[in-house]
């Protein structure tokens, strides 16, 4: 992380920073006890100072822009979550098929 980069897991903070002109560098999703945890990496000059405005209740932003940016970021977030869920299901299916093939050739299961 650089001084012009911040990691946030608060969707509203991420949206606020994007509305203020900062850029989304990366969006990651990990699973924590089966629930997705999303982290946004946002970059730009003075991003930390602007994040503090949000954290200390001094944030102001155009509401129409907030709504549009929220929808856009949520679309990206849910797309990433669906992609990971699909990959997880595909891996589980492959594991099940592999196990079934193993058992077919096992003399104990014949």
Image (tube, rainbow, N blue to C red):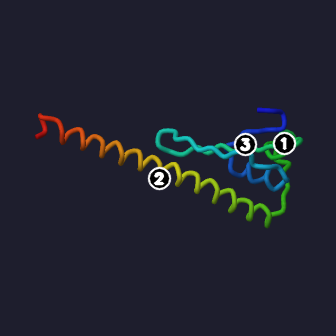
Query: Residue 58 appears at what percent x and percent y?
Result: 86, 48
Q: Quadrant of the C terminus?
A: top left
Identity of the residue furthest to the front in this view = 105
Query: Residue 16 appears at what percent x and percent y?
Result: 78, 52
Query: Residue 76 appears at what percent x and percent y?
Result: 64, 56
Q: Are marks 2 and 3 in contact (CB under 8 Å)?
A: no
- Gap in Å between the C-alphas at discs 3 and 1? 11 Å
Task: Name the mark on residue 86.
Answer: 2
Q: Is residue 88 shown above or below 108?
A: below
* Helix, strand or loop at mark 3: strand
Task: Name the mark on residue 41.
Answer: 3
Q: Quadrant of residue 48?
A: top right
Q: Quadrant of residue 107?
A: top left
* Helix, strand or loop at mark 2: helix
Q: Callout 1: 10 Å neighbours few (<14), some, many (20+)? A: many
Tell which circle, 3 or 1, labels the residue nearer the N-terminal end. Answer: 3
User: Dot 1 corresponds to which residue?
Assistant: 47
Image-based side of 20 in relation to 35, left or right: right
């Amino acid at each position: 992380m650089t001084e012009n980069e911040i990691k946030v897991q608060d969707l509203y903070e991420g949206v606020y920073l994007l509305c203020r002109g900062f850029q989304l560098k990366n969006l990651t999703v990990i699973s924590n006890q089966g629930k997705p945890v999303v982290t946004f990496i946002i970059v730009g000059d003075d991003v930390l100072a602007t994040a503090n405005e949000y954290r200390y209740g001094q944030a102001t932003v155009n509401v129409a822009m907030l709504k549009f940016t929220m929808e856009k970021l949520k679309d990206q977030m849910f797309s990433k979550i669906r992609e990971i869920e699909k990959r997880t299901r595909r891996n589980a299916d492959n594991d099940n098929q592999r196990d079934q093939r193993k058992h077919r050739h096992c003399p104990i299961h014949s």
